[in-house]
Amino acid sequence: MYELKAVHKRYGLAKVALRKIDLTVRDKEFLVIYGPAGAGKSTILNILAGITRPTTGDVLRDGVSILHLPPERRDAAMAFENYALYSHLSVGENLAFPLHARGMARAEIDQRVKRIAEILGIGHLLDRRPGFLSGGQRQRVALGRAIIRPADIYLLDEPVGHLDAKLRHKIRAELKALADDLNATVVFTTTSSREALALGDRVAVLNQGRLEQIGTPADLYHRPANAFVASFVGDPPMSFITVEPRREADRVAFVTPDGMPVATLRADALDGLRPADASIQVGFRSNEVRLAQQGDSAALRGRVDVIEHLGHSKIALVGIGRDQVSVSVPAHTSIHVGEEVAIAFPRDAVHLFQDARAVVHAVPSV
Amino acid sequence: MLQRPTSFATEVLRYGLIVLVLAFIVFPILWMVVTSFKPPQDVMVSPPRFLFTPTLDNYVHAIWEKNFLFYIKNTLFISVTSTVLVVVAGALAAYSFARYNVGDGHILFFILSTKMFPAIAVILPYFLIFRDTGKTAVGRFLGVGLDQPGALIISYTMFNLPFAIWLLVSFFQDIPRELEHSARLDGLSRMKVLRKVVFPLAAPGIAVTGVFTLIFCWNEFLFAYILTRKTASTITVGVESFFTLQGILWGPVAAAATISVLPMMAFVLLMQRYMVRGLTFGAVRG
Amino acid sequence: MASIKATGLVKRYGTVKAVHGIDFEIADGEFVAILGPSGCGKSSTMRMIAGLETVSEGTIEIDGKVVNDVRARDRNVAMSFESYALYPTISIYENIAFPLRSAGMNADEIDRRVRDIAEKMELVPLLGLKPQGLSSGQAQRVGLARALVRKPSVFLLDEPISHLDTRQRYRMRRFIKQLHQQYHYTMIYVTHDQEEALALADRVMVMSNGLIQQMAPPDEIYARPVNAFVAGFVGEPPINFFDCRLARDGGRWTLAFEGQTLTLPERLSDKAAQLGSEALAAVRPHFLSIGANGPLVLEGKVFVTEELQDQNLVMVDVGKVRFTLVAHPSVRPRRGEVVPLTIDADHLLLFPQDNSRRIDDDLAA
């Protein structure tokens, strides 16, 4: 088990990469660190590897500080985002490098190199130099070099980010299976919501050096802690409508500025809601709402602004007042830009945010 | 940009220009080689004679009477030793500048600034220092004194080191840090990382630096002329000794010059592959 | 605004052919996405339209006039690049005004145009700032504004949002789409991202190896791909391919695959007869389901289940072929479990096998 305790990292005087991060990597878990570029994801991996020292804070392994341990004594294997392949060695020698470094027998090295190369589909490239490979091929070599040897912890920095969509899909599945088989502790960074949800036992959402939320994929998806997580996890992003609360006896109705009711919730479920008139937003996922049919009671009216084809489905972007809500509809639905539509939403799929912090999720309304 | 088909006339003009520039560069070398095969009476005639009976007399004169091979042996020893020193010390220094930013750039600038002195400005202090060290026992033992190879080796090393460091720093900066991090995570110690990862990757840069240093040492005249008399003289000084009181022996001078150019020519051709890779890969770009 | 027509368009770089003679027409006000992997010729095609590359053979017409020999700046074509390249020392206002000033327009007209485009692109509050502090999404909008301020008749975009993060990409994508809907520019959008192409374009032109594979509206590209390349390049998660043998059994055609035999639906009889004994079959992950609920049932072993919360992706190995299927979040088969796998008979596609080789090659690249 690895722990970051109040880890703060500053580069130079002004550039803060991490802001007092507390993070635990449990044994045998697949932890995904997910966030936009520049969020500080790589810095966390570098600190775990011993390449970077935190400005303040501590790093523990099984309760013991390892701050003073240099990288070569940490038993971490890492795949770097920019591949970091040795250009003077062939692909096969690159893969074998970590094994040679620990003095493994030649026969076993050959066997391992062959197996990893096969899994990653680079078996035919073993004799080439990295300079003659495409970006996707290099990335697979880099990933292979990291996972080829047994290690206490595997640190994978966007290891599939530069692959094309098909290959990413394929390698992602292989990686998940491999992590299961090896029963290994893996920390994996990504900028893709899909990868984060697909791979992680737990996902840590990082933004501008701050840990926004850590939890299982289901936690992040169904109970996002704030508007950032809500809009960053899930594909397409959650859409929001700004509402005003209207108190009515034991319940609170939330209505748009135009007076359309969006949700009505029991007042006792709204402990977190402050009376102040700070902005309140209701969030919807595109697949939690649908176009209303006759007989639907709660429906929001709006106009279709944009329609996007996604192959199997379409996303209609419906303008409601000053907000836009994404609605996922089957590809064959007849719907046109400019059309007036009504949106219905199930009552258990309401996400309420005040000042961008989550107040309540999916409370059954009255 | 729209590329337009080039006309025949512009092609002719283009090649004409290339030939002109090439002739300008190659002619002096060609003239030197041709002169080295001319009999004495054909050397200084005007207009120059291009048809003559070639002779090896000049070479015989240079090698046997002037003992030119002795100068070549001296030069080889001094140049190679200085080059090895420069490359080793330069690589280690450059690595620490590139990776640890030692002195925050100030020391690097200071080192480079020593290149701003003209050689003639430091030659007098060098002369005085080596005159005195040559009189001490240690100086005599190491050959560090006037007309001793050690004096030239030290001078050349000091003189080339700043440039070598400056050249190598940018080569090392071009090697991604992650390569070293990765090797350390794989369990290699720092020295091993240098040996197995950093130096092999910087090989083209090191080769370029070595070649430049060697060429400089090989062709250096001023230091060698001032600091040596006889026992440690290098080829440039040797050639100068052909300018006798009786007159300049043009034929043997050309022969000696040709002989001294050949090893460098062969060496550079041999290293060309690395040089080109090194030049496009590293320093000169920055 | 303008229409574009290309006839027998070829681009050669020395002896290498990048575009192999393609024909297409783009209507006035249409939004076309050129989609393909790197090296397919999509950028060369766009650059020929822009006038940044010469045309090796064939013609390009804008509004019925051949423009092969018209210089880029006289074509009234604007182009926006992936790197938006703003001038750092001058204000946003001056950045947008730059192309007009270099064209020597008078100050009043420049001011009117800059304010007009800034309004459209929601940049008014930023006009006085320098580019330095802008977010990448804002900088991208300034880049677009600078391209559009000249009132081009054709607007070309070369992977304009591929470097933005997911959220900004969604936002910019919708912004560009709305821009088109409101002002009806003739737009050509080059991308390697199939989702972007489908989401944005009125029609998608899929290119590979310097040739147009298919040019059609997004729903058609997705549902009725003309060949295995298009089927494989479009769709997320990617379509499942499997090599199979076809045989006639009485009145019906059958498909044999990994020792299992399926009877093909009537719909595919003609296609099967045309293909003969060997074919490449394909089915999209959405049209596969776990359980035996139809005539086309295979048996396979579960490899991995990815829970994406709104849906689960289940990877199932049938022999050597790994199938991906999209399932409801409640479907969570265990690894190694043997399950029946039903192919939706209405959505099984058949292609000739030689086409499959090309797909594997592209995948390996």
Image (tube, rainbow, N blue to C red):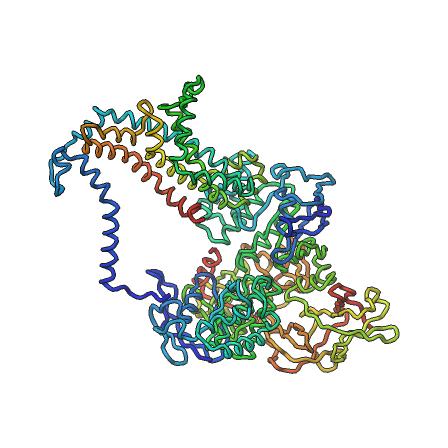
Residue at the spot 84% in from the left edge and 74% down from the top edge: A247
Residue B34 seen: yes
Which quarter of the picture shows residue B156? top left
Residue C176, x across and y down, in percent? 56, 72
C42 displayed left or right of C143: left
On screen, residue C185 above or below A15: below
On screen, residue C181 above or below C170: below
On screen, residue B93 above or below C237: above
The residue most toward the right is: A249
Compare residues A111 and C79 and report the one nearer the observer: C79
Which quarter of the picture shows residue A329? bottom right
Image quarter where the N terminus of chain A lies is top right
Compare residues C354 and A149 and report the one nearer the observer: A149
Residue A252, x across and y down, in percent? 83, 73
Residue A215, x across and y down, in percent? 72, 55
Residue A269, x across and y down, in percent? 84, 67
C334 displayed left or right of B29: right
Residue C305 seen: no
Image quarter where the C terminus of chain A lies is bottom right
Residue at the spot 74% in from the left edge and 80% down from the top edge: A258
C111 displayed left or right of B216: right
